Image (tube, helix red, strand yellow):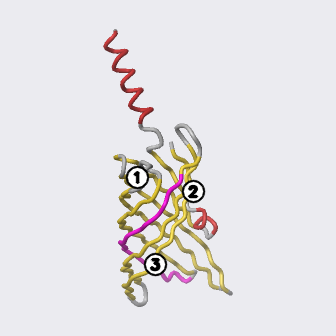
């Protein structure tokens, strides 16, 4: 019985020592434009964290007698290297390589369908705050960087676009 209590105490101490190692976030700017972006970040060491994000967008646009329905889905992965000397992940300054893939489709009322896919990879630098004392708090993540995008559209005509683009990000969430 004493051994069981010792094991439970050690496990409980381990969980409390790993406070604020998870963050769930959403992009408020994307929500304003009809895109839902949700991400989950998990600190895997004192100075490193994985983040995985999903996004979805859908809209119906009417112009005169033409109606266009669109939908898109995307996924992104990144690894954040935190380098603030006085803070551990997921707080402070970080640099992060990332990759993402998205796919979209649009269809008008005559049945014409257009597909779009994009792959991108790049690097970000940013700062993540976790507000609140104790074991949990609200998170604000601001970042900027550059990405290489390779995109193509298919339908009546195939179009490809490749090149570098800037990248800005804002996310609000909760850390625990």
The residue that appears at 37% across and 73% down in the rendered structure is 120
For disc 2, the marked residue is 172
The residue that appears at 48% across and 49% down in the rendered structure is 23
The residues bearing labels 1 and 2 have C-alpha atoms spaced at a distance of 24 Å
Location of residue 47 with respect to 70 vertically, above or below = above
Location of residue 150 with respect to 34 vertically, above or below = below
Magenta stretch: residue 111 in it? yes
Image coordinates of residue 56 in percent, x first then y, are 51, 64
The segment highlighted magenta reads: 110-129
- In the figure, is residue 169 to the left or right of 156? right
Q: Mark 3 Cα within 10 Å, few/some/many (few <14, many 20+)?
A: few
The residue that appears at 58% across and 67% down in the rendered structure is 30
The residues bearing labels 1 and 3 have C-alpha atoms spaced at a distance of 28 Å
- Residue 151 numbered mark, or none: none
Image coordinates of residue 34 in percent, x first then y, are 60, 68
Quarter of the image for the N terminus: give it. top left
> Looking at the image, which residue sits at the far bottom?
157
Circle nearer the viewer, 1 or 2: 1
Q: Of label 1 and label 3, which has the lower sequence position?
A: 1
> Looking at the image, which residue sits at the far left?
3
Q: Of label 3 and label 2, which has the lower sequence position?
A: 3
Image coordinates of residue 122 in percent, x first then y, are 36, 72
Image coordinates of residue 110 in percent, x first then y, are 55, 83
User: Residue 147 appears in which quarter of the rendering?
Assistant: bottom left
For disc 3, the marked residue is 166
The residues bearing labels 3 and 2 have C-alpha atoms spaced at a distance of 21 Å
For disc 1, the marked residue is 85
């Amino acid at each position: 019985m004493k051994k069981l209590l010792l094991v439970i105490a050690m496990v409980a101490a381990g969980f409390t020592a790993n406070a604020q190692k998870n963050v769930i976030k959403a992009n408020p700017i994307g929500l304003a434009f009809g895109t839902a972006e949700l991400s989950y970040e998990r600190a895997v060491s004192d100075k490193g964290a994985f983040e995985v994000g999903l996004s979805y967008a859908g809209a119906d646009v009417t112009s005169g007698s033409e109606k266009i329905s669109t939908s898109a889905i995307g996924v992104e992965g990144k690894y954040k290297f935190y380098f603030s000397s006085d803070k551990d992940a997921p707080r402070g300054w970080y640099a992060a390589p990332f990759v993402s893939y998205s796919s979209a489709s649009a269809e008008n009322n005559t049945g014409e369908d257009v597909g779009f896919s994009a792959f991108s990879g790049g690097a970000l630098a940013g700062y993540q705050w976790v507000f609140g004392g104790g074991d949990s708090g609200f998170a604000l993540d601001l970042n900027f960087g550059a990405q290489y995008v390779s995109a193509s559209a298919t339908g009546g005509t195939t179009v490809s676009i490749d090149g570098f683009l800037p990248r800005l990000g804002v996310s609000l969430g909760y850390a625990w």
